[in-house]
Image (cartoon, helix red, strand yellow):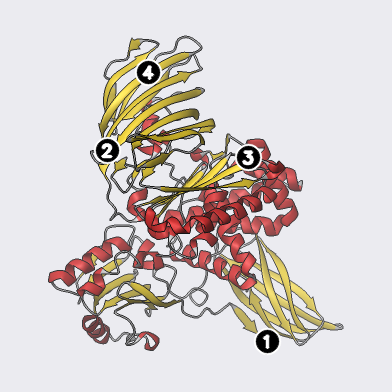
Amino acid sequence: MTRNPVPRAVVAWALLLAALGAGAAPVHYDISVTIDPVSRKLEGRSVIDVESPGAVTLGLSDRFRVRQVLADGQPLGKGRVSGGIRAWRVPGGAPKRRIEVAWQGTLAPLDTGLSHRQTLNRPEPVAGTEGTFLPGSSVWYPRIGDTLGHYRVALDLPAGQRGLVPGRLVQESESGKRYRATIEFPFPAEGIDLMAGPYRVQEHEFRGAGNRAIRLRTYFHPEIADLAPAYLESVADYLALYEKWIGEYPFSEFSVVSSPTPTGFGMPTLTYLGVTVLKLPFIRATSLGHEVLHNWWGNSVYPDFSRGNWSEGLTTFMADYAYKEREGPAAAREMRLSWLRDLTAVPPGQDRPLAEFASRTHGTSQIVGYNKAAMMFFMLRELLGSDTFDRGLRGFYREHRFKIAGWPELRRAFENASGQNLGWFFDQWLNRPGTPAIRLVSASSAPSGSGYRIEITLAQETPSFRLRVPVLIRSEDGESMRTLELERQSQGFALEVPGKPLEVGLDPELAVLRRLTADEAPAILRQVMVDAGTVTVLLPGAGKAREAAQSLAERLQDHAPKLIGADADLPTAPVLVIGLESEVDAWLARRGMPPRPTPLDGKGTAQAWTTSRTGGAALAIVSASNDAALSALERPLPHYGRQSYVVFEAGKVIERGTWPVKAQTVTFR
């Protein structure tokens, strides 16, 4: 699979209990939990101290049976069920109250066949001998509303299993047939995620800022235990990088934990990554750093989900993109191109304002919440300068560590650092859906004094954005970059250059968040994946090939496939065609469409490619030599949406790429 973007394992608790009127109060949880991965049985006891006289709401997943629930020694009754959550209204009273709960139940069976997308959309507590995962969003323990709380968890597992929750390991032991560990988290936390498995644990001590000891650990399945030393070394490098860039690491430890499913989650003090993911050689240089950085952004400065999630975009910019900048300008430009390609693939009207992004649930939400936000931070750094941008980040971290902060607080931090009013910048990129489409309408030149005068006209759609648009002037004297301040729908600019101009190009380094033209962004597979208007043609008529084609169509798209017949007229919407080689070639020939691209002909057991149709949107073709080769695409192909073509051999990628890009230019005669 491709690089896993590893989102945080947070589903806003407010989405579960908003209708129940959840209250807010300082809360401390003292939890004891025993889990048997074989029988999948869980037994728990919790003492919850609430330091507030106001009424609060207590909730627990309805999959569990409550043996006892008391508030200051008084029974609370059966509660009521809504949306799979059993909830109790705890009335107001003394300034400090104690709630005691004993519960038990059976966890769902571990399903290692789930995709990462399915795992994201199924916040369900699961258990098995290969792994146990109880996401906080599944409400596996009794919790108070949407309130941040500290906790102490005592975990009891069979011998051979190891487990943890985010926090500081206070003690652990293995005696007889049991493993026990106690972990505490003394800071406000959004929820408690629990992981367990047949782990081999390795440890390393890192000295952070001020020579502070930070415990680094790996909890790895036996088959990947040999990877532990390299992962521990990489974590230490990332901690050193971000302590210098942002400020002191907020916790006392960090662990890398393996999952039997292709998972990628980040939590305070740890990251939870699939075994198959951890085996990939590039993960230490990409996703791992992303998750380490989330301990600053998201896990110690908490996003205000009601006003949008800024942490994914900022982390993508300071991790994934920063690593590309380390490689060099070409690699950084290629990542910006991939972001803009993705944004261009989202049809107008089908995206949402960035301020509405809370968490990743499908391809379009990732494009907006990660890519658009990261590009926005890139442009903000270009506007303010690196030193001012970094000063704003450090101030934001200092002021909001272990607090909830939204986009307005982030904006104020950059305004304080720069002395500028940035309202216009944040307003247009956060609150408006879509992205501007900029055109280089015309350009002309004429001698002027000792040099030449160039007149350029740029245009954009309405309503207009306020944009700083770079243009590259190539002349007999060399090349120079100029920045044009575009604010209106159509605007003219005049420039003076000393040498005879030869050519002008619009934004050649892709430094502006914008919708690319067809020449700038040739078709990619993601266009048929995210467009709700995409129609699908399944060429196999029956049998295993038809079943494989149907299943693949469902996995490739963010929506239920809209099927049309093989001989139906094609709409102007994007079209996805899936079939066996002979069927695909015959279908293309009947339609008078370009045949299988020559660079792909005869390669691999399966191929996917895109092409543009005259007068229509993108066409994506998936072709396989047989039904087994078609089935083998179900897991890997959805991860290659940024490609124009991909070639597979028995389900493994052997070749991929994008069709050539042509920039907007005008050549002077």
Query: Which amino acid type corresponds to the residue marked 1 in the rendered image?
Result: Phe
Q: Mark 2 and mark 1 in contact? Answer it, CB < 8 Å.
A: no
SS for callout 3: helix
Mark in the foreground, 3 or 2:
2
- Residue 129 in picture, x, y percent from top left: 29, 46
The image quarter in which residue 640 lies? bottom left
The Cα atoms of the two marked residues, 3 and 1, are separated by: 47 Å
Please name the residue that numbered disc 3 is placed on: 409
Mark in the foreground, 2 or 1:
2
Name which of mark 3 and mark 2 comes first in the sequence.
2
Name which of mark 1 and mark 4 comes first in the sequence.
4
Q: Is residue 412 left or right of residue 340?
A: right
- Residue 587 in picture, x, y percent from top left: 24, 82
Query: Which amino acid type corresponds to the residue marked 4 in the rendered image?
Result: Glu
Seen at 29% across and 65% down, the residue is 634
Seen at 60% across and 75% down, the residue is 441
Please name the residue that numbered disc 4 is placed on: 100
The image quarter in which residue 399 lies? top right
Query: Which amino acid type corresponds to the residue marked 2 in the rendered image?
Result: Leu
Name which of mark 4 and mark 2 comes first in the sequence.
4
Query: Which amino acid type corresponds to the residue marked 3 in the rendered image?
Result: Glu
SS for callout 4: strand
Mark 3 Cα shell of 10 Å, populated few (<14), some (14-19), many (≥20): some
Please name the residue that numbered disc 2 is placed on: 107
Query: Is residue 507 among the parts visible in the rendering?
Result: no
- As drawn, the residue found furthest toward the front would be 176
Mark in the foreground, 1 or 4:
4
